[in-house]
Image (spheres, grey):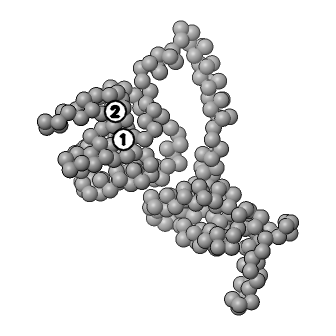
Amino acid sequence: MQGWIKLHRKLLENPIWEDPHYLKLWIYCLMKATHKEREVILGNQIIILQPGEFITGRKALSEDLNKGTKPKLKLNESTWWRYLNNLGKLQMLNIKKTNKYSVVTILNWNEYQENEQQMNNKRTSDEQQMNTNKNVKNVKNISSSNNSDADFAEIMKFYRENLQKGISESLYNYELIQQWFDEWGKDLLLAAMKLSAQREAKGTAFIEGVLKNWKDAGVNNLEQARQYQLQFKQSSNKSFHNVTPFKPKEEDDGYDYGF
């Protein structure tokens, strides 16, 4: 197979980075995908693959990924196939299944592919000018990058350093955090994580409880979350029937809520 693939540094923030099997599977998919349109003969059928696609099946996938692997690290066909489908749930690829084979399509394939024409466009006769252009490009990429990526990276950094240590993590937890980030944004999700860290509650269960309480109470911003936590603290020693319904205040009362 010919052609190049590119890997973005944001892969470090992807939940698959934490699992060597998922990481191996993803790189395998990128390597297997065709870089240009081509025909594949399968039995008496001709299949036309588009850039970013490849053909596989449970047995072929398992054999390729287990090749050269120590016995204790090998995974069975069902597990590799489940992992592949999980990459689909993470919207990294699509799988079109038939009763004989499956066609896997890498989503956003152009982000991982650099063809010869693109490489030639980057070359200049003056090496110094080429280096200068690369430096300018890097500066532009930093200044125009999506703030959402940096915010999510901060969320994951806090989670790993404060809430993940000492426990076994699953891909499901990272999917939850991504969903919460999309729904609540950086500030509120980070606030919920700080409350969890204060309680030394590892994992995601406590965070989920905090966010559910906030949602039920109609909390929409960081100040309302602070007010809710103060009221919750004040009412913790009272009976349920004596708790005053949460009502957001107009101004900040200056209380330190820990976030």
Residue 68 makes an appearance in the image: no
Residue closest to the eye, 166 or 53: 53
Work out whether residue 141 can be spotted: yes
In the rendered image, the vertical position of residue 77 relative to residue 227, given as above or below: above
Q: Circle 2 — which element?
A: loop
Residue 3 in which image quadrant: top left
User: In the image, what residue occupies the spot 65% across and 66% down?
Assistant: 192
The residue tagged 2 is 50
Query: In the image, residue 210 lies at what x, y percent?
Result: 63, 71
Q: Name the quarter where the C terminus is drawn.
A: bottom right
Distance between mark 2 and mark 1 Cα atoms: 9 Å
Kindly indicate whether the residue at mark 1 contacts the one at mark 2 (C-beta within 8 angstroms): yes
Q: Is residue 11 left or right of residue 148?
A: left
Residue 229 position in % (x across, y down): 73, 73
Which residue matches tag 1? 105
- Find numbered disc 1 in the image and state the secondary structure of the residue it sits on: strand
